[in-house]
Image (tube, helix red, strand yellow):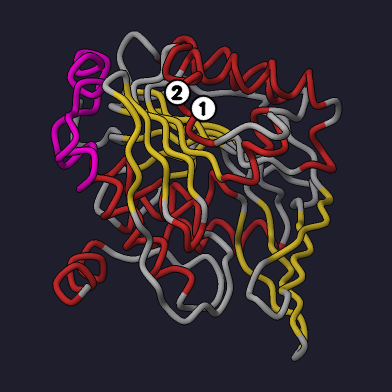
Amino acid sequence: MTSESPTAIVIGEALIDIVTTDTGAVEHAGGSPMNVSFGLARLGMGVGFLARIGGDARGELIRHHLESAGVRLLLPPIAGVPTSTANAVIGPDGAATYVFDIEFSLEGLPDLPPADVVHFGSLGAILEPGATTVYGLVAASRDHATISYDPNVRAKLQGDVAAARDRAETAVRLSDLVKASDEDVEWLYPGSEPADVAAAWVALGAGIVVVTAGSAGATVATADGVITVPSYRVDVVDTIGAGDSFMAALIGGLGDLGLLGAERRDALAAIGREGLTALVDRAARAAAITVSRAGAEPPTRAELDAFAAVG
């Protein structure tokens, strides 16, 4: 890779979170893939982000937010197109519920630069016409990049459960690293145990599958079996971006271990219990930092290292 090329490409939606609490509404740049790209850049990775952003004031807010962390937009804002939004209502427990106004397409694609990892998921993996383009780009990237995926289920936009499950399993088959929440798993496979689903996804071809469960920790599966890794208890301000910070830290951690890139696929799948536990523990620390402050504000590498020193 050249010094100008990103080491990660993230593909998916970017939008504005309109966050409503009992004190009023505030707008933040958001969208799960966008949050992952921002989190990766904060951890020191070079990142290119492929998304549809409107050429309006909200699009400018997203662009400035990403560029503040060093993320490179791979598509320019589209003039005359409004930026998508998600109305997020924060409950007493800090959890957010969302109502979306979103369109997702990827026209006028540039030639993508080489990357060690390609991340996708969320609404960008289900909303047409963009989703078909996303899957084509991901499939074409497997010959040189690690693939990571987060379904980030939004039930009101998913449609039929069986069709959504088939689509998620297609994504898992393309992926080396998968992160899902226990709520994602319950919606896709009602009544199933997270450990069973994680193991089934490994059987489909994923090297590492992590299912998070908030304060209950994470279930982690590889071909060597299933382990659990605890979370960190902090005072929760809100949960926006927690899973995305976790995802970014997983990807960044694999980079630190030299396990990114298609040529490292077998080594990633054979990471071993000790390395896997340390990897997921670091991701749990990233999520803990994020939920302790308002909005999707993932940690910098320095903040994550400092938390590790006192955690």
Which quadrant of the figure has residue 77?
A: top right
Q: Amino acid at mark 2?
A: Ala
- Point out residue 84 in the picture as x, y percentages from the top left corner: 76, 51
- In the image, is residue 119 part of the stretch drawn in magenta? no
- Point out residue 6 in the picture as x, y percentages from the top left corner: 31, 36
Quadrant occupied by the N terminus: top left
Q: CA distance from mark 2 to mark 1?
A: 5 Å
Establish if 132 lies above or below 106.
Answer: above
- In the image, is residue 255 part of the stretch drawn in magenta? yes
Residue 199 or 74: which is nearer the viewer?
Answer: 199
Q: Could you say whether the residue bearing mark 2 is in a helix, strand or loop?
A: helix
Residue 232 or 38: which is nearer the viewer?
Answer: 232
Which residue was labeled with disc 1?
196
Q: Amino acid at mark 1?
A: Asp
Looking at the rendered structure, which numbered label has been put on residue 199?
2
Establish if 209 lies above or below 83.
Answer: above
Establish if 210 lies above or below 271.
Answer: below
Would you say 71 lies left or right of 302 here?
A: right
Query: Residue at the spot x=50%, y=63% of the render?
Result: 65
Query: Residue at the spot x=41%, y=39% of the render?
Result: 48
Query: Residue at the spot x=48%, y=41% of the render?
Result: 211
Which quadrant of the figure has residue 161?
A: top right
Highlighted magenta segment, given as a residue range:
254-278
Pointer 1 local density, CA inside 10 Å: few below 14, some 14–19, many at least 20:
few
Do the numbered discs 2 and 1 sit on residues whose CB atoms are within 8 Å? yes
SS majority, magenta: helix
Residue 237 or 113: which is nearer the viewer?
Answer: 237
Establish if 93 lies above or below 135.
Answer: below
